[in-house]
Image (cartoon, rainbow, N blue to C red):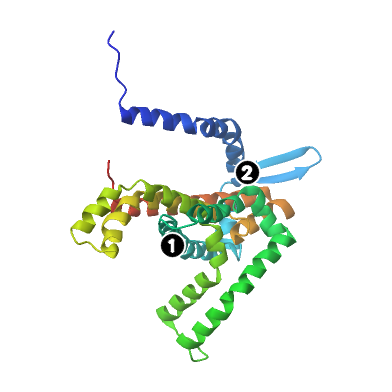
Amino acid sequence: MRKKTIGLTSRRAFYGYLFILPFVLGFIFFMVKPLCQSLNMAFSEVGISNEGFSIVWNDFANFKRAFLIDPDFNRLITESVTQMLYRSIATIVFSFFVALLLNQKFKGRALARSIFFLAVILSSGVLVGLEYNNTLMQSLKDTIEEAGDVNVITEVLEEILVPDSTGVNGFSGKLFKTLFEIIDSIYEVAMASGIQIIIFLSGLQNISPSMYEAAEMEGCTAWESLWKITVPMVSPLMLVCWVYTIVDFFMKSDNLVMEKINEQMVVQLNYGFSSAMAWIYFIVCMILIGLSSLIISKVVYNYD
C-alpha cells in the first residue's frame, strides 16, 4: 500500500484537534449531564423537600414568567446587551492600540509587556473573586480610580459639552452619555483587555517586516501602512477577540443578569425559574455571537 503524504494543513488541523481534545473530553464527561438537567429544570417546577428534588413538567411557564411577569428581567437583558456592545468595542480598540505600542522597539519593552500581561493574571478565576470580594483589592481599585481623577475629567467634559442643566436630548445626549460611561469604566476596560492584547500582539509579530519596507519604498506613510497593511493582516484576530470579549462580558460575576440568576437560585431556591433565565441569557449570548461573527467575517481579510 502506498503511504499517504500528510500536508501542512492536515498536520496543523491534527495538532489543533489534539490540543482541544482535553476540553472536548471534559465537556462530554462533566458538562453535558448538568446542561441536560438544567434544561429539564427550565421547563419544570422544581420542589425541594427532605426526600430530595421533585421535578414537575410545566411547559413554558418559567419562560413566560421571565418575559411577561418578572418586572426586571427584560430591562436587565436590554441594559446588559447595550453595555456589552459599547464596552466590547472599547475593549477591542484599547487592546489593539496597546498591542501596537508594545510591538514597537523601545527600551524596557519586555518589562512593559510583562506589566500588561499582569492583566491576564488578574483576570483569572481566583483573582477575579479577590477583586470583588477582597477589601484590599477593592481599595486598590478605588485608589487607581481616584488617582486618575476619571470622574472629575468626565464631569468637566460634561459641563463643557453639555452646558445647560437639561442636557442634550436625542441621539447626541445618548452618545455623550455612552462616551462618559466608557471613560468612567476605563479600569474595567483595561482589566478585560489582557488576553486580547496578547492575541493582537502575536498577530502583529507575524506580519513580515518586508511588507512595511516595500510600502515605505513606494512612499506609503505610517498612517497608510496602518490601514493598508496592519489592520487587514490582523483583522481575522479581531473576530477571535470579539467573540472572547462577548463571552467574557456575559460571564462576569458583577453582571446584573448573573446576579439576578444567582439570587433566584441560591437565595430563593427557585431552580426552575433561574434555569429558564440562564438558558434565555445563554441563547441571547449565542445569537449575538452568531450575528456579530457573520458580520465581521464578511469584512475581515483572509490570507494563506
Tag 2's secondary structure? Answer: helix
How far across and down, in percent of the image, does residue 119 sit?
56, 55
List the residue tagged with mark 2. 41
| Kind of residue at badge 2 | Met
The residue at the point 58 percent across, 80 percent down is: 152
Between label 1 and label 2, give the one nearer the viewer: 1
Position of the C terminus, as image quadrant, is top left
Tally of marks:
2
- In the image, farthest residue toward the right: 50
The residue at the point 70 percent across, 66 percent down is: 139
Q: Tell me: residue 49, above or below residue 232.
A: above
How far across and down, in percent of the image, does residue 10 sit?
34, 28
Q: Cα distance, mark 1 to mark 2?
A: 35 Å
List the residue tagged with mark 1. 89
Tag 1's secondary structure? Answer: helix
**Residue 188 - label:** none
